Image (cartoon, helix red, strand yellow):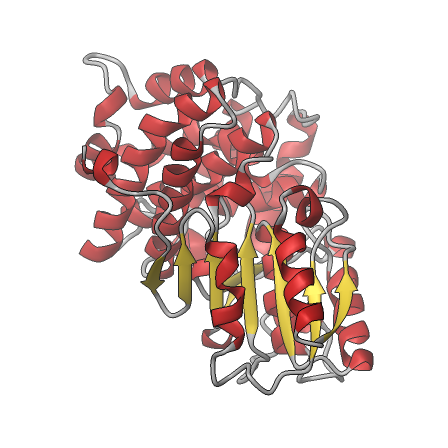
Amino acid sequence: MWEKENNIRNIHEIRSRAMIYFGIGAISKIEDVFADKHLKDVKRITVVTDKTAYKVSGAWEYVEEFLQANKLDYLLFDEVKSNPSTDLIDKCIAKSLEFGSEAIIAIGGGSVIDTGKITGVMINYPDVSSEKLLEYEFFPDKSLPVIAINLTHGTGSETNHFAVGSIEAKNYKPAVGFEEMYPLFSIDDPKLMSTLPLNQTRFVTLDALSHAIEAATCKNANPFAKTLSVKAADLVLRYFPLILEDLGDLEARYYLAFASLLAGISFDNSALHLGHALEHPISAIKPNIPHGLGLATLLPEVLEVIYPQAKEILDEMFRPIKKEGVSIKVLIKDWLSSLGLKETLSDLGFTKNDVDSLVALVYTTPGIKYMLASSPVEISEDMVRRIYTNSL
């Protein structure tokens, strides 16, 4: 395979709508980032992150040293949690406004980067809450520059114009997408991902694979998205078992990070549909459930539903593990189990009594209707209910 001839320590410029520095050691490109004409006059920055990953990963050592050496003032907002709420995002916006921030550096996974992207947009509209944005009641037209330093190989948020936040009072977890929400620069340094613990490694990789599957099977998916998704799936299927054998395997981290990047660009050029549409209510009701784990519990049933209309592309994506005479549902269940992903919705604390609430959220959460409309098969309420029930 060509990967063996590739030097994983070379840092490459990968251009989507964001400029992405990719490769082991890419964090060193922070100096190049701030030499850009859009950032050279910036003096005050909000650093958006969580309590631990930015330090444990080693990213903060580089970023803090750079900020101090260049006499850049920064506000450290380290309060982001998984599935961030609009209250938390609004707090980040308010503190950034008070500080006078001129740019955002987001250091973390999807929740952190999404918080940074929404903050970058909404800081320009101090009289509007982020809830209005996520309920499709407000449409921004500008953003501060956002630099995304990605610490997981799952989110894809560093590559695209989407962001997710939770409206806790309504159990909504909408996704929104605006041209203004592309990061100006992103850094994907697989070495910074090497401290991801075992379960988090599993969950984020499943998120990336789900992005690839949904982007490739989306109604009217374009050839570019399909091509990226097929390669992303190939890399996940080959390198996922290797990283679980050795969490310090930098080559495996590199290609899983590359798979995530490809999948992020893929769904930026296509869309997501059934799996994400049904997962968002799960982690909205129970915010402590990792997004990738929620996706894993639904994936066998989702694939069974879409397979008749997406057989050719799915067969190509899963060729490395395909077994003759085995249904797609059984194939994926067995594969997930072999990787330590055996949980069901029941294991996550859901019962049959919760199914009606989950179904209702699918049809009331802002934006999910667009995901359902992108499915390769027509989705009915009975079908949604069946997927949840069979996933218990």
Whole-percent x and y of residue 162?
50, 62
Q: Does the image show residue 374? A: no
Of the pair 234 and 176, the residue shown nearer to us: 234
Of the pair 206 and 71, the residue shown nearer to us: 71
Q: How many tags in the picture?
A: 0
Residue at x 67% of width, y 54% of height: 60
Q: In the displayed structure, would residue 273 be above or below residue 327?
A: below
Q: In the displayed structure, would residue 387 be above or below residue 120?
A: above
Residue at x 27% of width, y 34% of height: 234
- Residue extending farthest to the front is 69
Of the pair 89 and 295, the residue shown nearer to us: 89
Q: Quadrant of residue 308?
A: top left
Whole-percent x and y of residue 56?
68, 42
Q: Quadrant of residue 209?
A: top left
Residue at x 21% of width, y 48% of height: 227
Residue at x 59% of width, y 80% of height: 144
Q: Does the image show residue 169? A: yes
Q: Is residue 265 left or right of residue 41?
A: left
Query: Can you say which quadrant of the picture contains the N terminus?
Result: top left
Q: In the displayed structure, would residue 32 be above or below residue 340?
A: below
Query: Can you say which quadrant of the picture contains the C terminus?
Result: top right
Whole-percent x and y of residue 90?
76, 69
Q: In the displayed structure, would residue 42 be above or below residue 244?
A: below
Whole-percent x and y of residue 322?
24, 20
Of the pair 141 and 8, the residue shown nearer to us: 8
Q: Is residue 297 left or right of residue 98?
A: left
Q: Quadrant of residue 281?
A: top right
